[in-house]
């Protein structure tokens, strides 16, 4: 029997790798195309880089799933790792509901395969919509591609290009892209991140979210939290977030930059301001007993007692779990496994599709 040449062997390995990527993406649409192993197969390191081949594999899969390409972005991998291609797709599921999907490819493989979600899936929390660009101060538009903070660029200064995804409820996720995989940054925030702000004007965005308020709420405080990128994760425990909350809380350490005090025309406005100041004081790291005691000294008329009690409970929930710092109010999804070659510090992976 004739022995295969090196070229033939490499070509065969490439075909096997592409087939493996297609099978993984089409089978469960999870973020990692490497399956339960959560790391590239050995063939990925042996096969020559082939970005065009991986994009063709994605085209085949998208056609089989009835997905239409809506957005394509390109970026550069660190350390001359080559180009990265981000694609956002749209489609319709079996019951006529709009679906979305994201595929990210590098010369080494299809490193992200998120969505589409099955029509019968009860848990719709997985983010499957590509957000091309973040615009500070507003919930992002899935068609906006001209913003400075664009998917496929390094959004947080750690050297890796990032991908911004959104789930059906509007919550954002940010993922780091490396040649052989992607990993989601952990987020510590008191509310689901839905938009971004540059609170310290340093050119790097902080994630932000508000506690939802029911329509017609008589007090309707704005309970806003922010998370800056520090230590490999987005956290409201860091310096930028604490300074933001201290400024809004007023009093010691505010530096004269606090949120302008709302004219107290009525009881609702007075209580709204008190709730917001207590919220920001707690997230700035000030003593919980002091902040809540000041809140409890506010006179509350009978008509507002029920609403005030509900908001006070939310504010109290932002108090530190221990004297050492603020609580982690959102746990990252998925297992934390040290040592993965594409995993930035503090990131977590999305669980397999069930």
Image (cartoon, rainbow, N blue to C red):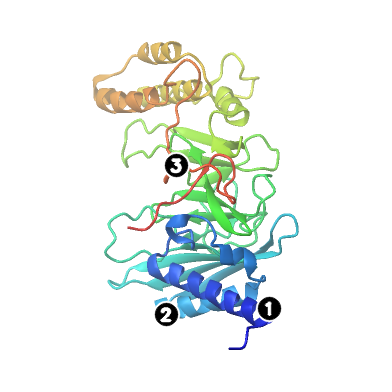
On screen, residue 50 above or below 239: below
Q: Which residue in the structure is indicated by mark 1?
A: 6
Q: Residue furthest right?
A: 80
Q: Which residue in the structure is indicated by mark 3?
A: 332
Residues at marks 3 and 1 touching, judged by CB atoms closer than 8 Å: no
Q: Residue at x 54, y 60 (%)?
A: 40
**Position in image of residue 240 (x %, y %):** 62, 30
Q: Is residue 227 left or right of residue 288?
A: right
Residue 320 picture quarter: top left
Residue 335 picture quarter: top left
Tag count: 3
Quick check: can you spot residue 85?
no
Q: Is residue 166 left or right of residue 163?
A: left
**Position in image of residue 49 (x %, y %):** 67, 70
At numbered mark 2, what does the secondary structure look like: helix, strand or loop?
helix
Give the CA separation, mark 1 to mark 2: 33 Å
Q: Nearer the viewer, residue 252 or 36?
A: 36
Q: Residue at x 55, y 26 (%)?
A: 245
At numbered mark 3, what does the secondary structure look like: helix, strand or loop?
loop
Give the mark nearest the N terminus, 1 or 2.
1
At numbered mark 1, what does the secondary structure look like: helix, strand or loop?
helix
Give the mark nearest the N terminus, 3 or 1.
1
Give the CA separation, mark 2 to mark 3: 32 Å
């Amino acid at each position: 029997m004739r022995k295969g040449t090196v070229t033939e062997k490499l070509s065969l390995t490439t075909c096997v790798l592409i087939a493996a990527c297609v099978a993984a993406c089409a089978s469960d649409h999870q973020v990692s195309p490497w399956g339960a192993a959560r790391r590239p197969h050995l063939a990925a390191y042996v096969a020559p880089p082939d970005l065009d081949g991986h994009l063709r594999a994605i085209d085949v899969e998208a056609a089989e799933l009835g997905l239409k390409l809506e957005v394509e972005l390109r970026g550069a991998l660190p350390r001359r790792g080559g180009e990265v291609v981000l694609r956002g797709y749209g489609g319709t599921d079996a019951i006529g509901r709009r679906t979305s999907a994201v595929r990210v490819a590098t010369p080494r493989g299809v490193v992200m395969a998120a969505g589409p979600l099955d029509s019968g899936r009860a848990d719709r929390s997985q983010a499957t919509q590509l957000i091309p660009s973040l615009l500070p101060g507003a919930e992002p538009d899935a068609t906006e591609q001209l913003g400075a903070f664009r998917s496929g660029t390094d959004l947080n200064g750690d050297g890796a290009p990032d991908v911004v995804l959104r789930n059906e409820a509007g919550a954002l996720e940010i993922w780091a892209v490396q040649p052989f995989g992607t990993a989601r940054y952990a987020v510590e925030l008191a509310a689901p991140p839905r938009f971004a702000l540059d609170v310290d004007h340093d050119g790097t965005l902080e994630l932000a979210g508000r506690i939802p308020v029911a329509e017609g709420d008589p007090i309707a405080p704005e309970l806003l939290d922010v998370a800056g990128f520090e230590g490999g994760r987005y956290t409201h425990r860091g310096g930028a977030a604490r300074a933001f909350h201290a400024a809004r809380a007023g009093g010691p350490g505010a530096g004269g930059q606090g949120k302008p005090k709302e004219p107290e025309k009525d009881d609702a406005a007075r209580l709204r301001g008190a709730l917001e100041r207590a919220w920001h004081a707690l997230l700035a790291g000030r003593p919980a007993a002091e902040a809540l005691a000041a809140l409890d000294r506010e006179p509350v008329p009978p008509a507002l007692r029920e609403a005030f009690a509900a908001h006070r409970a939310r504010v109290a929930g932002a108090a530190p779990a221990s004297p050492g710092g603020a609580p982690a109010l959102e746990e990252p999804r998925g297992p934390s496994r040290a040592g993965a070659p594409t995993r930035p510090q503090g990131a977590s992976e999305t669980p397999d599709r069930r």
